[in-house]
Structures are given as structure tokens and as C-alpha cells.
Amino acid sequence: MIQAEKKKRVIDIKNLDMKLKIENDFYNVINEVSLYVEEGEMVALVGESGCGKSMTAKAAIGLQPENSVLTGRIETDNENLLEYSEKEWEKRRGKETAMIFQEPMTALNPLIHIGKQIAENARTHGADKNEAKQRALEMMKMVGLPDVERLYRNFPCQLSGGMRQRAMIAMALINNPELLIADEPTTALDVTIQAQIMELLKEMNEKTGTAVLLISHDLGVVRNMCSRLYVMYAGHIVESGSIDEVFENPMHPYTRGLILSVPDVTKREQELVSIPGTVPSLAERKQEGCPFYDRCERRLEVCQKKACEMQDVNGHMIACHLYTGTQKEV
Amino acid sequence: MENQKEILISARDLCKEFKSNGRTVHAVNHINLDIYKGETLGLVGESGCGKSTFGNMLVHLHTPDGGEILYQGEEISHLKKKELKQMYRKIQIIFQDPYSSLDPKKTIGWLIEEPLRIHRVGADKQERAKLVQNMLEVVGMDESYLDKYPDELSGGQRQRVAIAIALILNPEFVVCDEAVSALDVSVQAQVLNLLKKLQKQFSLTYLFISHNLNVVSYMSDRIGIMYLGEIVELGDVKEISANPLHPYGRALFSASLGVGKSNDSRIVLQGDLPSPSNPPGGCPFHTRCFMATEKCSSVKPELQNLGNGHYCACHRVEECRKRAEAVCGLEKKEAVTGIA
């Protein structure tokens, strides 16, 4: 497909596989995952816990566990990031690609002043001491922290959860990265604070043009924040497309189950749709067939033996045999 | 019309304080609340607002510092040990974290049987075993789980076991304290369905505590909204979720995002939850309220009855009400984005 104006992809993951080595056995954590984020975009990666979302994010910033084996490609600027050495990663991490984590308390060093930690990221990427401090103060103001001069000399424990997450965002954005990976940034926060942080992320995305890959299990948040999404199940991407299309017309049985199982007041009189069973653990995962086979209520005979490839159906990509042709359901 | 419903448990002017480092935290501040038989009362609020402390007091895990708890008209907060044990058969609690609420060294069968042994229910081992098996079936598990240990189970299964333990003595009143918060969405739906089914089957009364508004509005008949140890709004679920009157309720509901459609009219509150050890004077919410006036910072609004069982503690409730009516007329067309 040739588009008139092709936007640059700040990250382009192609057929990424990750295996974890645990006691001489290899377990598949991520299977053939392909996803991209264009500049300035907000993209979501959703799925339940244990589906490999965080592992994908970690691989994208070179923080995969030591016992992992990665194959495939992660491209930016025509380079394969999988071939990067740790030295090259150190240059890239925090500059072109930045990340914020779920739990702001454990991600910050409790013994170093907040301001210094924010400035440190500028320092490591070439700014001198005064410049780094100035930029840190500016960033702190920009993310809505009050009384920045005083806060600069506060320790993380003196800040509330929401303020800590703001500090994390300031730290991540100080070098104006192309891509910000936000791994469940609001899960540990209260609803009203969550709204603040989400608003801030959206605002920063508009102001600085930093693309965001938002990893979340909260479909409500994703619905209101992002323009595209990828749905992940047991290490596979099973559906992707624009937010409105996927939410209004979810096709993969897993996506449908996920969206329909969110409770709300209008469903009071009915039983909630739920997906039987749970996400299989690494050891329980089958090597062949569709990863969702065991929990799927619309499975076909073919699903047991052969997983479906991602294909374009009515505008969004989906990996499900249901939409490939006429097959008998079992 | 409220007289028609039978009150099962009620809190009268209930208070609880915690002291730490010489400071006093008013976790629960003069709460009055009736819970009717057979209903589900949802309690929502942010962390630290005292909703769990309140729930714990009702099941006697905390002793109140003031006020009283009436169970079918009887004062139960200062019972003697023996009477208390009888009380425990009627009131039970399900906790948030099924990973830490089950003893890892005991089998599932042992865990579910424990309440029976303590309360000497069932004549002998066989009879108890039978009760345990029945209970397991009720929560949707089979007997193969009897000899398993909690760490062999998934989160959803553990929560089912926790439910089985809570229900095996046939209680009347169950506090669900964030009972599904640790679960994934698809599993959460399974457990919510189970809780609803069991409520019908055993005619249970629930106090459903959660910070997740979607879950609470799905489960509850009435909702109470708590802020800094106080109930600021209480009413029928349909009324509250469609048109919360209290500014805090409005902010909460607009911040909770559904999957239905994109919501552009969110109210984003400024600032953090004030420390409960040093709550602001006047209306506890005035520091973050987008409608606050002079009066709000000095005079504390009382929880007033607006009819139809709807209660709200706000000085500007009349304006809120007019606005709500106007919004209803306009079918929620207008957007409230700004913060005054």
C-alpha cells in the first residue's frame, strides 16, 4: 500500500518471538508479534495479565530478561534494535525511546531528590549540570507539578502517587523522545488521579508530538485515549485496528469477550458475558493451533491444529479462522 | 416507603480513629447508614476514604470508637465473646487478595471445612465433608480441588474458594471488600456472575466495597459515595450513575471510563486527596471542588434527604439538581469540561 504521505514509524516490530529459558526448558512468551507506532500516534496494547504485553514493551526498549532469546526484528530508522549492544542501548534509552512504569514508587530511587533524578536523564544524554537543572524544572512545571523549586529537593516518599507519576513522566519526556512506552501508568492510582494522569499524557502527546505506546488492561482508558489498538492473548496479537472500529465491531472471540465482560450499570439485569477458564500459564501453552482454542466458544475444527494468520477483514486485522471462509463450528 | 423494607444492619453515628505518630486519623467520621435485607449496597471512594474500615467494623474486625451497629435492631458492636461467635455465623467477609487471605499450607478442603469445625456444625467428619463438597459445587468447582493447595489455583479459583469459606455457614450478610479487584476482566465477570447467582440462591445481603465504579454500578441496588471518612452521597444506583448530584460524585463518575463510547466531557479534579489526618475544615471536598464557594470552606454541609432515598451533602445541591434536570432534558448533550 502506498500512501500519499507516509508517516515515519517510530517503532516497527516485525515477527518478534521471545522464548524464556527456565531450567533448561524454553517457553514461548511472545509469538510472531508485529506492531508499529507512527510518529505522534497513541497506540494501545491490551490484554489480560500474563499475555506478554509487558514483555513486548520491555523488548522494545531493550530491557528483556537475561534468560530470554529474541528473534525477529524491531526496526527504527532502518536499524534493527535487536542487534544493538548494551552501549548502543544506553544511548538510545531515555533519549529516543523512553518508558514509564506502573508503580512510581519502586521506579524512583528513594534516596535521591526528585529533581536530581529528573535532571539525571538529561545529564546522561549530554546536557551540562545547569542546563539539566533548568530543563528538569521546566519539565516539572510542564507536567503540572506545583512549587517546582521546592519539589526539586524533595524525596520521592514526600510525594503522593499522582505526583510521583507526574515526576516519572517529566523524567521520561525531558529529552523529547520519539516514543514513550507507558506500561500500565495508572493502574496503581485512584480513579480521579488516573483521570489527571491520562489527561496529562494526552496533553503531552499533543504538545510534544511524542508517540505513546500505552499498555493497559483497562479497556475504558484505552477507549478514551488512543487511536489504534492491538489486542494480545497468550503471546499472540489476535486483533488490531482503529479504536472505534474494534470497539464497535469486535470480531475475534477474545476481543468480543473482553469488551462484553466489562460490567456497567446498563447490564444490571443481565448476566455478564464471561470467558470460561483463565489465561494459560507458560507451561500450559500449546505449541500448535489457535492460542485461544481452549477458551473459545466458537472454535472450529481447524483451530485445534492450525493457528490463523493475521489478515485484513473489513478494515481491521484479525487472526481467526471464523472469518476466513465457511467452516463448520464444533 | 422505606418502612416497607426490612433493615438488616445499620450504622448509627459510627466513628473510627487511628492514632499514629501523635496524629489522629478519622478513618470513619460519624456515618449513618441502613442496609436493607436482600439488597446490595455499593460503597465507592478513593483509597484512604475509609470504605474498608467501615466494612471491617460491620464484621467486627475493628471496634468502633463511637456510635453503634445494629443488627436487626440489636446492638452488636460490644458483644461478649460467646455472643460474638454466634454473630460471626451471620456476617462474613470476602477480601480483595485471594493470594494472601488463604493459608498456603492448608488444603482447599481443610480451609473450607474450618468454619464448620469452629462452629461445630455437622455431626461428624463425613457430614462435614459432604457440606464442603456441596459448597465447592455451588461455587463452580469440583471435588478434585479438595486436596489441592492454594498455590495450585488461579486467582479466580482462589476467590471462589474464599467465597465458599464465607458462605459455608449460611450467613445473612456478606461484606465484599474489593472482592474482584485483583482479577482480570474475563475472570472478574465470572466471579461477579457467581456472586449475583449466590445472592439469589441464599438470599444474601451484600455490602459491596470497590473503587471500580463500573463493577459497583453493575452489582448494587444502592450506591454510597465516600470521601474522607464521610458519606457525601447515597441513593438508588440508576439515579446516581445517571445523575450524580454531589460534585465529587460527578467527578468520580465522569472519570470512570466505560467501553461504550468515547467520553469527552470528563471532569478532571485538581490536586490530590487531602491527608485524612488533617482534613480540611468545612466541607471536606472543598479543596478540590470545582463549585466551591466561601461558605464551603467554613461550614460543613449535612447529609440531607432529597426524597426517594437520595441523600447528598452539599451546600449547592439545589443548583446541582437543577443542572441535573436540565442535562436530563438535553439528553446529556452539554459537556462539562471546565474547572472553575
Image (tube, grey):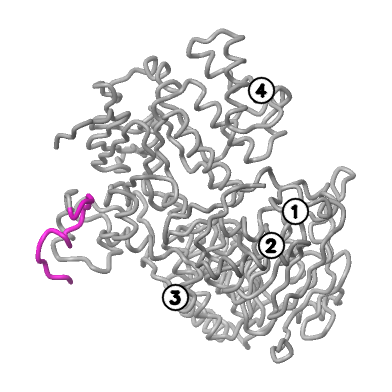
Residue ID at (29%, 36%): A36
Give the Cα distance between marks 4 and 2.
41 Å
- Tags 1 and 2 touching, CB below 8 Å: yes
Residue A60 painted magenta: no
| Disc sitting over residue A112 in the figure | 4
Precedes in sequence: disc 1 or disc 2: 2
Q: Amino acid at mark 4?
A: Ile
| Disc sitting over residue B285 in the figure | 1
Tell me where residue B7 appears, x and y as whole percent: 73, 85
- Tags 1 and 3 touching, CB below 8 Å: no
Q: Amino acid at mark 2?
A: His
Quarter of the image where the N terminus of chain A is located? top left
Tell me where residue B37 appears, x and y as whole percent: 67, 85
Residue ID at (43%, 34%): A181
Q: Camera-side residue: B273 or B314? A: B314
Q: Could you tell me which secondary element the residue under label 2 belongs to? A: loop
Tell me where residue A66 appears, x and y as whole percent: 39, 29
Precedes in sequence: disc 3 or disc 2: 3
Q: Camera-side residue: B63 or B120? A: B63
Tell me where residue A76 appears, x and y as whole percent: 29, 25
Magenta residues, as a range?
A313-330
Horizontal side, residue B235 vs residue B129: left or right = right
Residue denoted by label 3: B140
Q: Chain of mark 2?
A: B
Give the Cα distance between marks 1 and 3.
43 Å
Q: Is residue B130 above or below residue A96?
A: below
Residue denoted by label 2: B246
